[in-house]
């Protein structure tokens, strides 16, 4: 399925966190979804402390959506680079 506007808006904090992990001062740092997700999960774990927030199924769903978003962003970036502009 496609990622809809509502899903992005509902998870905007995660989107910004993902973009922060992918880019630094406008420079592309990372495109590997596994590495980015590990960094985000590490930050989430630190923020949650010992509260154990989130269920296992929810984490898998979030990971699948995240992987799809990264894949789509990667395809768009490659398409943009190959076409010579935005």
Image: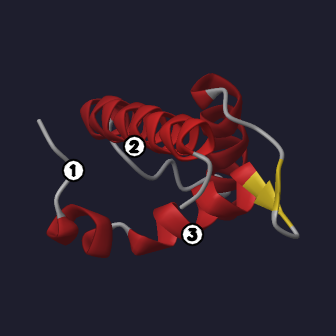
Camera-side residue of 5 and 58: 5
Badge 3 vs badge 1, beta-carbon distance below 8 Å: no
Residue indicated by mark 2: 69
- Which of pointers 2 and 3 lies earlier in the amino acid sequence? 3
Query: Can you give x and y, in whole percent of width and height, for residue 41 in the image?
Result: 62, 42
Q: CA distance from mark 2 to mark 1?
A: 7 Å
Task: Tell me the mark number nearer the camera, choosing from 2 and 3.
Answer: 2
Q: Secondary structure at mark 2?
A: helix
Q: Quadrant of residue 6?
A: bottom left
The reply to whether dot 2 and dot 1 touch (C-beta < 8 Å) is yes
- The disc at residue 3 is 1
Q: Residue at x 56, y 44 (%)?
A: 77
Mark 3 or mark 1: whose residue is earlier in sequence: 1
Q: Position of residue 60 (x, y in %)?
A: 33, 29
State the residue at coordinates (38%, 48%).
54
Q: CA distance from mark 2 to mark 3?
A: 12 Å
Q: Which residue is mark 3?
A: 16
Q: CA distance from mark 3 to mark 1?
A: 16 Å
């Amino acid at each position: 399925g496609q990622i809809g506007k509502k899903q992005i808006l509902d998870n905007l904090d995660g989107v910004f966190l993902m973009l922060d992990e992918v880019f630094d001062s406008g420079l592309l740092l990372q495109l590997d979804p596994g590495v980015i997700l590990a960094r985000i999960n590490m930050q989430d774990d630190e923020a949650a402390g010992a509260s154990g927030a989130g269920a296992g199924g929810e984490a898998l769903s979030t990971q699948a959506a995240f992987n799809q978003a990264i894949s789509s962003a990667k395809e768009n970036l490659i398409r943009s680079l190959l076409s010579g502009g935005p």
